[in-house]
Image: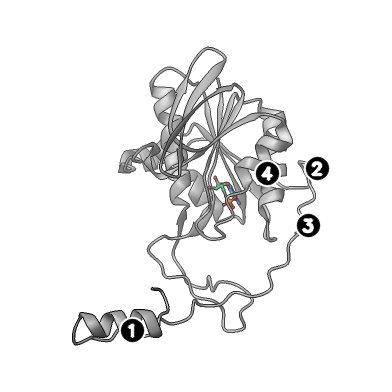
């Protein structure tokens, strides 16, 4: 069973995102970019399934500018067998990514597609669900455990207050949550080996997909600054403030 894994190049999770001065988007000039953390978990899961003899080839896919090659090389250094870059400098929204992934699924015929549950830059949490919808496949989102059986998979999902266990038919779309696994560190020799792995580049037009945005970003702004705290003299003052000022009791 071939696995397709979607890896997005996103703002590094250690970087504090700042809006551009005109509010037209997030300022990405000179900002460190990395693989979206949930996608590292997705790649790790694909590799573990391969190591367990449950999967064959792992194909990593990234959609975006030429710099996404780096993200694909990281996926290949972790253990993916090859990469496909769908290259475009245009804005690509989740529905367009889902359509591009669908076109690649039609071509590559994987039995499983693993994505991150969400990209930490746009926090959309949409692409995996849209892909499953477009393909007419089952989906196991927010996955905390994936076990591949005979023609089906068991997916444990993180839901509010507990874990939900699903049995879903293969082929299947899975989106990775935080507790699915802990991604491995990439070792230097593997970075060197990854440079020799095949990386194909296609364009949205090659795949026959129109990526015109459907949603208009109106404004990006900082959250309001938090007001400073105050010290209260005693419990009576605290209760009075909670009742009269915060109005929470
Ligand atoms: P989102 O729906 O934008 O929160 O993204 C959910 C997941 O879809 C991500 O964790 C990735 O696995 C995948 N994805 C979204 N955008 C891209 C992209 N441009 N290239 C590759 N994968 C993507």
> Mark 1 or 4 closer to N-term?
4
- Residue under label 1: 241
Q: Name the residue under label 3.
A: 212
In front of the other: label 1 or label 4?
1
Give the quadrant of the N terminus: top right
C-alpha separation, residue under disc 2 versus residue under disc 4: 13 Å
Mark positioned earlier in the residue sequence (2 or 1): 2
Q: How many labels does the image show?
A: 4
Q: Distance between the residues labelled 3 and 4?
A: 13 Å
Task: Give the label on residue 208, or none.
Answer: 2
- In this rendering, the answer to whether 87 lies above or below 110 is below
Answer left or right for 137 relative to 2: right
Distance from Cα at disc 1 to Cα at disc 4: 50 Å
Residue 3, percent across and down?
55, 28
- The label nearer to you, 1 versus 3, is 1
Residue depicted at x 37% and y 41%: 179
Which sits in the foreground, 240 or 160? 240
On screen, residue 107 versus residue 57, left or right, reads right
Quick one: label 3, few (<14), some, or many (20+) residues within 10 Å?
A: few
Which residue is identified by label 4?
98
SS label for mark 2 = loop
Q: In the rendered structure, which disc, 2 or 4, sits on the residue that comes first in sequence?
A: 4
Question: Between disc 1 and disc 3, whose residue precedes?
Answer: 3
Q: Which mark is residue 46?
A: none
Q: In which quarter of the image is residue 64?
A: bottom right
**Alpha-carbon span between mark 2 and mark 1:** 61 Å
Q: Quadrant of residue 109?
A: top right
Q: Which is nearer the eye, 164 or 19?
A: 164
């Amino acid at each position: 069973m071939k696995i397709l894994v979607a890896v997005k190049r996103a703002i590094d999770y250690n970087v504090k995102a700042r809006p551009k001065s005109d509010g037209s988007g997030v300022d990405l000039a000179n900002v460190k970019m990395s693989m979206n953390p949930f996608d590292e978990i997705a790649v790790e899961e694909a590799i573990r399934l391969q190591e367990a003899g449950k999967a064959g080839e792992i194909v990593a896919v990234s959609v975006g500018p030429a710099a996404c090659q780096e993200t694909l090389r990281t996926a290949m250094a972790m253990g993916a067998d090859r990469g496909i870059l769908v290259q475009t400098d245009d804005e690509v929204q989740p529905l367009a990514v889902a359509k591009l992934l669908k076109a690649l699924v039609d071509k590559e015929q994987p039995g499983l597609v693993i994505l991150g549950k969400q990209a930490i830059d746009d926090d959309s949490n949409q692409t995996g669900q849209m892909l499953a919808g477009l393909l007419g496949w089952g989906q196991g989102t927010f996955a905390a455990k994936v076990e591949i059986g005979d023609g089906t998979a068991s997916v444990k999902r993180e839901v509010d207050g507990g874990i939900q266990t699903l049995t879903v038919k293969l082929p299947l779309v899975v989106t990775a949550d935080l507790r699915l696994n802990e991604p491995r560190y990439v070792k230097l020799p593997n970075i060197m080996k990854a440079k020799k792995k095949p990386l194909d580049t296609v364009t949205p037009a090659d795949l026959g997909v129109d990526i015109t945005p459907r949603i208009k970003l109106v404004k990006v702004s900082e959250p309001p600054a938090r007001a400073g705290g105050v010290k209260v003299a005693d419990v009576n003052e605290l209760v009075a403030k909670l009742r009269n000022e915060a109005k929470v009791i």
